[in-house]
């Protein structure tokens, strides 16, 4: 008897009809005699709407209360999914993250899973139930409700698959798998049959929201092989797994555009040891993730530089508050925020063994009249910050140059 973990995202449970479809799919696996654990997201739009409500009350709400609020989205879906299975005469029990034994640290809205003790899940499976677990949420040792960051139901599914030593982990979504670019932006994008953890990790971290990047990190660490596939049909999806030698033959596996980044520039920062450390320590302590960092050369004799970095738009207000609080101590002149940026990236393990990739990307952007604001590279990716308004045009041009 196999243990299968199936995760259904927001669109896949976006209406009661969709939830009934999920129940039908689950029942097919159940009929084969397998034990099925279902992880569900909030119905599509629900999490965004809860965030909107909170911001109508105050711009920077308490993160503990945000978690209390956001965790309700998934709680609605688990109960409805259990009912849909009951209506088909299948025994099913819904569990919150805490009831499923998911223990996290106390970093509200971005909590990390510390351990999972799926005793209750095993017990319910062994007595013949389908177990439905609320994605995206957990509980601290002290009993505080936490959430795992946007898209966090993916992490719930992968982490449960690891803890249960599941035989199969399927991530059901609203596209047929992982594509060479977001198929909604680039119509010529192709579905990948397989992709390595490292490539998926970069793509996810760079804006391909089909998988939450932390969930991929977790899968790599614990060797969880998973499939991304559609909840709307039976087409085979994309297998995400450890790199194989033939994967290096392709230079660029995928192209991603992240429209949710903002750029923060600190103007006129004193050019002396310890300043950058002070700034990024304060940012890091507030659990704000920073990606690209660029420091310009000292301005003439003034002994000052500009430091720019990118971060999630959602963290911008918090970053500004932190920077305001250290401005006089550090002595920079001004904080300039720019939300109209896009981060465009190409990713592929083949870049390790091929040259001229950056030049080709920059040439393609030049031909498309797209100016490059910041550049960052790693062994298997090149990212550039560009004008948001040109993002979609740029992603199409770069996809066509490298992938066709
Ligand atoms: P779910 O609610 O199922 O978690 P998401 O909306 O989080 O689904 O992720 C699925 C979406 O990711 C797709 O609808 C697609 O527009 C987007 N996407 C971005 N990049 C890619 C990519 N490279 N391959 C597939 N989908 C992508
Ligand atoms: N509902 C959460 C979100 O919208 C978690 C998820 O869907 O994975 O981010
Ligand atoms: Mg998602």
Image (cartoon, helix red, strand yellow):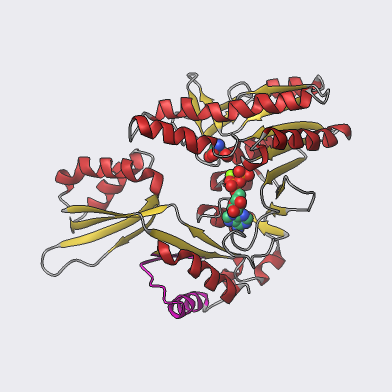
Q: Residue at x 26, y 52 (%)?
A: 276
Q: Residue at x 65, y 27 (%)?
A: 78
Question: Residue 105: within the magenta?
Answer: no
**Which quarter of the image is occupied by the N terminus?**
top right
Extreme residue in the right direction: 32
Q: Is residue 376 or residue 344 the one in the foreground?
A: 344
Q: Residue at x 61, y 69 (%)?
A: 350
Q: Position of residue 115 (x, y in %)?
A: 58, 30
**Is 186 situated above or below 280?**
below
**Which quarter of the image is occupied by the C terminus?**
bottom right
Q: Find residue 27 and report its image quarter.
A: top right
386 vs 254, left or right, is left
Q: Is residue 99 or residue 142 the one in the foreground?
A: 99
Q: Find residue 317 and report its image quarter.
A: top left
**Is 319 situated above or below 305?**
above
Q: Position of residue 390 (x, y in %)?
A: 43, 67
Q: Residue at x 48, y 69 (%)?
A: 394
Q: Position of residue 243 (x, y in %)?
A: 67, 59
Range drawn in magenta: 357-386
The number of numbered discs placed on residues in the rendered structure image is: 0
Q: Find residue 386 and report its image quarter.
A: bottom left
Q: Is residue 56 or residue 149 the one in the foreground?
A: 56
Residue 54 in view, yes or no: yes
Question: Residue 363: within the magenta?
Answer: yes
Residue 198 in view, yes or no: no
Q: Position of residue 70 (x, y in %)?
A: 50, 30
């Amino acid at each position: 008897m196999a243990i299968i973990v199936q995760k259904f995202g927001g669109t896949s449970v976006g209406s009661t009809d969709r939830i009934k479809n999920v129940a039908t799919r689950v029942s097919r696996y159940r009929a084969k005699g397998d034990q099925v654990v279902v992880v569900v997201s909030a119905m599509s739009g629900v999490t965004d709407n809860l965030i909107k409500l909170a911001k109508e009350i105050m711009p920077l709400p308490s993160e503990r209360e945000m978690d209390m609020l956001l965790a309700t989205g998934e709680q609605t879906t688990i109960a409805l999914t259990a009912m849909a299975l009951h209506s088909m005469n299948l025994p099913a029990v819904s569990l919150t993250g805490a009831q499923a034994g998911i223990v996290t640290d106390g970093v509200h809205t971005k909590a990390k899973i510390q351990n999972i003790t799926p005793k209750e899940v095993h017990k319910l499976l062994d007595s013949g139930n389908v177990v439905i677990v609320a994605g995206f949420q957990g509980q601290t040792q002290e009993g505080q409700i936490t959430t795992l960051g946007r898209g966090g139901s993916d992490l719930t599914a992968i982490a449960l698959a690891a803890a249960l030593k599941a035989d199969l982990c399927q991530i059901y979504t609203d596209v047929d798998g992982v594509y060479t670019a977001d198929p909604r932006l680039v119509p010529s994008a192709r579905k990948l049959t397989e992709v390595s953890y490292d490539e998926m990790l970069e793509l996810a971290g760079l804006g391909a929201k089909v998988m939450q990047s932390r969930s991929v990190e977790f899968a790599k660490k614990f060797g969880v092989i998973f499939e991304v596939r559609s909840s709307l049909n039976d087409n085979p999806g994309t297998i995400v797994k450890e790199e194989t030698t033939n994967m290096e033959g392709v230079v660029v596996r995928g192209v991603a555009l992240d429209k949710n980044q903002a750029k923060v520039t600190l103007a006129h920062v004193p050019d002396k040891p310890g300043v950058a450390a002070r700034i990024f320590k304060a940012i890091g302590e507030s659990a704000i993730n920073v990606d690209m960092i660029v420091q310009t050369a000292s301005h003439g004799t003034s002994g000052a530089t500009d430091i720019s970095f990118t971060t999630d738009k959602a963290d911008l207000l918090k970053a500004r508050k932190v920077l305001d609080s250290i401005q006089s101590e550090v002595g920079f002149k001004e904080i300039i925020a720019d939300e109209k940026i896009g981060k465009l990236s190409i990713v592929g393990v083949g870049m390790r063994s091929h040259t001229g990739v950056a030049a080709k990307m920059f040439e393609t952007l030049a031909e498309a009249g797209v100016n490059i604001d910041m550049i960052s590279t790693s062994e298997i990716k090149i990212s550039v910050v560009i004008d948001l308004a040109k993002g979609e045009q740029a992603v199409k041009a770069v996809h066509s140059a490298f992938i066709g």
